[in-house]
Image (tube, helix red, strand yellow):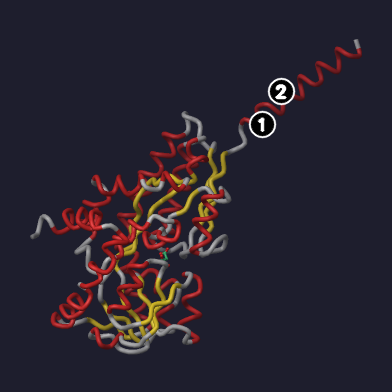
Amino acid sequence: MHKLILTAASVAALALIGPASAQAPIVIKFSHVVAPNTPKGLASEKFKELAEKYTGGKVKVEVYPNSQLYKDKEELEALQLGAVQMLAPSNAKFGPIGVKEFEVFDLPYILPDIKTLRKVTDGPLGTKLLKLLDAKGMTGLAYWDNGFKMMSANKKLLTPADYKGLKFRIQSSKVLEAQFRTLGAIPQVMAFSEVYQALQTGVVDGQENTWSNIYTQKMHEVQKHITVTNHGYIGYIVVVNKKFWDGIPADIKPQLDKAMKEATAYGNGQSQKENDDALAEIKKTGKSEIITLTPEQDAAMRKALEPVYQDVAKRVGQTVIDEFLKETRGATN
Ligand code: LMR
């Protein structure tokens, strides 16, 4: 009798534990390095909102902005180790883990506009590039936009000669390194979270970034001039730890895919506005002079940077560069 009561009690206890543990949500830690009020910050929050809504709380997304969990280089390593589940590093940051092909997006003046970019990311090349991530223990889910980069320094940057001898912070991309070397400048790889201080203390003289990143990191407060060059692009590859992603139950996966698709459309529809707003705010502060190049100056910059394509062809892969150019210039040439 005593034994029977115990058994009944354990059954009851098990019944209590059972459903509770089945309800424990799957947690996706999403780490990133930028501020919440940026294109990536907004898209990641949108993904959180939709993923939690569509899965009815079976998935919980924790977004950690501003490098609070990991800095640039550590981020991808943490994902590979499974310490975080989702990231959206910029295309420039995949070189150090051996996926150099994404550096094609860093080539100077390779994209005339975002509409053209879409032809690459939504086309066969975009799919092929994402597939390269499988071998690195991650799955590429989407392309998120930031936008076009500007050049800043405490010196006016008007012509290629103005860059000579200046130190510029770069992301960890060999294409960006070649870009600044071609201009006679000295590139220095540095984590995003360290750029403001490096500019403030003069460790570097200048940097390149989008308006939203310049504004949210307050770089305009420590750079006297920003030149509207639109010379390069920053976009993101949303990646997840492959093992984690493959282990998501089949009844939950489609809802996460839907949330990612919609968050991508939302974020990419919003990025231009975020950058425009950031530029307006920078102008309002009056702290940095915004320089517009003349058509001649713009042409001189384009010409000066042409050799970069040749310099990096071996590293990035001539085929990838050619496929990219076929998509982006094929229609206009
Ligand atoms: C940078 O390091 O400048 C950018 O990649 C930061 C970001 O994620 O936009």
Ligand 1, seen in the image, is in the quarter at bottom left
Name which residue lies at 30% across and 83% down.
184
Helix, strand or loop status at disc 1:
helix
Residue occupying the far left of the picture: 333
Q: Is residue 13 above or below residue 236?
A: above
Choose between 90 and 310: the one closer to the eye.
Answer: 310
Q: Circle 1 sits on which residue? A: 20
Residue 165 picture location, percent across and down? 35, 88
Residue 213: image quadrant is bottom left
Residue 131 picture location, percent across and down? 35, 44
Residue 16 picture location, percent across and down? 72, 26
Q: Is residue 173 above or below residue 249?
A: below
Q: Is residue 254 above or below residue 305?
A: above
Question: Badge 1 local density, few (<14 within 10 Å), some, or many (20+)?
Answer: few
Question: Badge 2 local density, few (<14 within 10 Å), some, or many (20+)?
Answer: few
Name which residue lies at 56% across and 39% down.
26
Name which residue lies at 53% across and 60% down.
74
> In this image, 63 relative to 101: left or right?
right
Residue 292 picture location, percent across and down? 22, 81
Q: Is residue 184 above or below residue 57?
A: below
Distance in Å between CA atoms under marks 1 and 2: 9 Å
Which amino acid, by three-letter code, is at mark 2? Ala
Q: Circle 2 sits on which residue? A: 15
Helix, strand or loop status at disc 2:
helix
Which amino acid, by three-letter code, is at mark 1? Ala
Residue 24: image quadrant is top right
Choose between 228 and 126: the one closer to the eye.
Answer: 126
